[in-house]
Amino acid sequence: MAQWDATDKTFLITGGASGMGAGFAESFLRHGAKNVAILDIAEELGKATAERLNKAHGDKALFIKCDVSKEEDITSAFDSVLAQFKQIDVIINNAGVMMDAPDMWRTATDVNYQGLVSFTLKGVQHMRKDEGGAGGTIINISSIAALTRVSFLPIYKGSKLAVLHFSQCLALDPFYEDTGIRVLTMCFGATDTAILQNLETRTYHPKQAKILVKAVATNYICQKVESAVIALVEMFKIGAPGSIWLSVDNKPVREITLAIDRAFTDFENLLK
Ligand SMILES: NC(=O)c1ccc[n+]([C@@H]2O[C@H](COP(=O)([O-])OP(=O)(O)OC[C@H]3O[C@@H](n4cnc5c(N)ncnc54)[C@H](O)[C@@H]3O)[C@@H](O)[C@H]2O)c1
Ligand SMILES: CCCCC[C@H](O)/C=C/[C@H]1C=CC(=O)[C@@H]1CCCCCCC(=O)O
């Protein structure tokens, strides 16, 4: 099994000021990363996280304020990271929000999907070996939301399936052979972060809010951030180009590429 190594690699992590993103930054620095750029809309939190990481790991972290729903922020943040670190080896498209409320859906879609596409395409342009780049890894954060159907989070779930489908299509052969860029997709289950707070206001219609809150209270094991971080680092080490992974219930990370392949092969067979 191929093993990928974080040593001396430069990471760009969106939504890295808090939650799982901050956990990934910390963990990859412990695994020998050369530098970590944290991009986030939350300025105070981002500065504090970078300061904490710099104290613990010796000035390797950089915070840049960036709203991933805004193309001008993305361009300027990407350029700033390159100006500072010269190269980006790994991008983790982690920034995400669960906001299906009527006045928030467009922003939510921009953050969860458009921002991720934009960073991915910029990363591909920078990293692709067939145009002089050094190759690299792009990790896109999806969710179990992409794999299941419920009535109350259609916008969130749609955006996370878009992330999964964009990533798997982009990575199809001969992408890795041409570019030397490994695209990995992670589907996390419920994980103990701020995204699970104040859920009543997150559904697209108030009638759904009660169902959501009740379902969360009764149906779900909420895994620890540490488990999600361990899962992502393990995927980084062993994940084949184009592979898709699942991290739920504090269990070891599991590859689900074949299951996704089977589902799409079924759809494709309908067209024959
Ligand atoms: N926690 C879960 O249960 C869970 C499960 C599956 C997938 N996910 C996904 O994991 C990723 C991380 O989520 P989390 O649970 O750590 O959430 P979180 O809310 O704790 O952290 C998200 C981070 O993204 C930042 N952010 C929000 N909007 C932004 C924007 N416009 N531009 C830049 N940064 C922005 C926030 O400031 C925050 O630091 C998200 O993509 C989320 O959808 C979370
Ligand atoms: C009843 C479901 C409400 C949510 C339960 C859980 O605490 C939430 C986890 C979400 C947080 C962010 C996600 O991606 C996670 C997944 C969100 C979508 C979950 C759909 C669950 C399902 O289809 O069974």
Image (tube, rainbow, N blue to C red):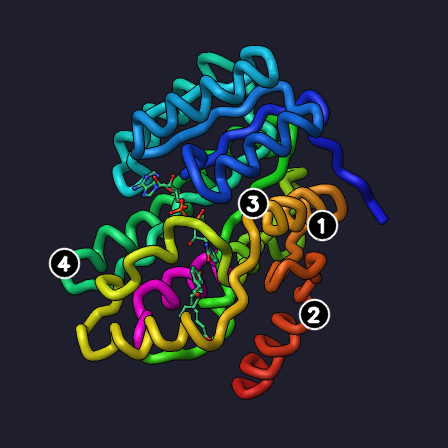
Element on which disc 2 rests: helix
Amino acid at dot 4: Asp
Residue 180 numbered tag: none
Magenta residues, start to end: 152-166
Residue pointed to by mark 3: 139
Residue pointed to by mark 4: 103
Identity of the residue drawn at 60% across and 26% down: 133
Amino acid at dot 3: Ile
Which numbered disc, 2 or 1, marks the residue that appears first in the sequence?
Answer: 1
**In the displayed structure, would residue 180 be above or below residue 53?**
below
Which numbered disc, 4 or 3, marks the residue that appears first in the sequence?
Answer: 4
Quadrant of the image containing the C terminus: bottom right
Give residue 234's position: percent from left, percent from top.
Answer: 71, 46
Res. 183 visible in picture: no
> Nearest the camera: 21 or 81?
21
Label 3 and label 1: CA atoms lie apart by 10 Å
Residue pointed to by mark 1: 239
On screen, residue 236 versus residue 155, left or right, reads: right
Determine the image quadrant of residue 109: bottom left
Element on which disc 3 rests: strand
